[in-house]
Image (spheres, rainbow, N blue to C red):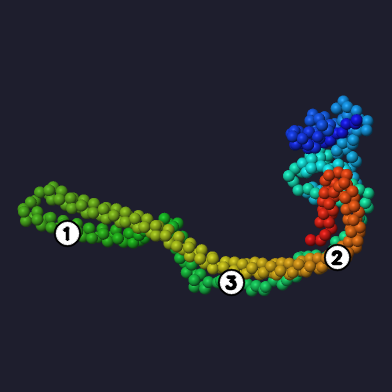
Amino acid sequence: MADTFKWTAGGEGGVVGCPGTVLPAGWYKVGDPTPLATTWKNPATGSMYTPQELGGLSGGTTTGATTPTGTTTPVNTSGQIFYQGKPLGGVTTDFLNMTMPEKEAWIKTTYGVDVTGQTWSYGGTAPKTASTPVTTPLAIPQVTMPNINSINVPAPTVTPAPAFEITPEQQAWQDKVGGYISETLEMGGRGIPQETMDLMVGKTTDTLKAKETEDLRVMKNNMERRGITNSGFIFSNEQKIRSGTTMAIANSITDLQIQNHLMKVASFETAMGQAAQFLGYLGEMSALKNAPATQTWMAQTQANLYQFQGKLDIYKTQLQAAYQTQNTILQGQISMQLQKDAQVFEKWKTEVELEATKAAAQAQGAGQLAGTSIGAMASLIKPS
């Protein structure tokens, strides 16, 4: 008696006549839990194992051997496996009899795509002799879409802000104050004018000289009253008075020079503060001069934004109208197409149901997959 071979994706061994045994994926001889091959295709030929090849692996006879599961010829592409919106290819007649894990293992082995736990579907006709419905491709209407560059929206009119101008009196004051501060800083500060210092030194000298003359007169009178006639002694006292006058004049000049330097330092420090304040004033004047141009630029930019927003509003309205027009045309075409396809589909459905009933009597699960294929095709044709 010929051997029968089957492919299993792994699991409980009831599929190959070994119930209660956990088997790995592979080709098995019915009733034998030892795998003959662990791949769906023969590596030597690149095609699925034939009964003769499997018989050779098992060492049994192949005469009259039953065609093993998965070795039948794939059906045409009108019935295909779809994964991620793309067709992978057709299936074999035994694909309909497989369990879900076996189907997923068959897809992975045949097409190299692992769909385990993923969403995939089988659409089209099951292996049968019924005719495949032919439908006319639906033409998508082409509606001219709007172009935003062709939309003309006038921009709001912007009137330039008036320029800021200072009065001649204010300009003259700026020149005067700025020049004085700059000159003070360049001089290192303003001290006592040299002419004033000369007058002060001269006045101090005259005062000290007058005091010297008076001191000499008083000293001589005292000498005479006391009867001192020693000319050397009298001359010595006179020189002391004259030396004191000279020292007083020198001290007054030194004090005046120190005062002059300190006044220059104080003046320089004051000028630096005035310069900082004047720079702040000039900054405010510059801001006032530039303010009209800045305000005009801001107003013009705002006007441009309003203009572009107006173009966008018109563009969105036109775009929505274009899509509504296209959808209206497309809905009418779909309705007419469904009416034309309904009769073809009903005829095809009847043929498939008859084939599914016949297949259900021959192999368990075939009718179920045929019904699944009908539902998949109906879901593709039925409008949402």
347 left or right of 265 in image: right
Q: Amino acid at mark 1?
A: Glu
Dot 1 surroundings within 10 Å: few (below 14), some, or many (20 or more)? few
- Residue 214: mark in rendering: 1
- Sequence-wise, which precedes: disc 2 or disc 1? 1
Query: Label 3 amino acid?
Result: Ala
| Residue at x-position 29% and y-position 58% | 201
x and y, in percent, of residue 178 in the image: 47, 64
Q: Is residue 37 left or right of residue 313?
A: right
Badge 2 marks a residue whose secondary structure is helix
Q: Report whether 295 appears left or right of 217.
A: right
Observer-side mark, 3 or 2, equals: 2
Say which residue label 2 marks: 335
What residue sits 75% from the left and 33% below the top? 21
Q: Position of residue 246 (x, y in %)?
A: 24, 52
Dot in front, 2 or 1 = 2
**Residue at the (27%, 52%) spot, across then down:** 250
Q: Residues within 10 Å of mark 3 (few under 14, many from 20)?
A: few
Residue 384 in which image quadrant: bottom right
Q: Earlier in the sequence, mark 3 or mark 2?
A: 3
Q: CA distance from mark 3 to mark 1?
A: 75 Å
Question: Depth-wise, is mark 3 or mark 1 nearer the camera?
Answer: 3
Amino acid of disc 2: Ser
Q: Secondary structure at mark 1?
A: helix
- Label disc, if present, on residue 259 of the rendered structure: none
**Circles 3 and 2 in contact, beta carbons < 8 Å:** no
Q: Nearer the viewer, residue 118 or 260?
A: 118
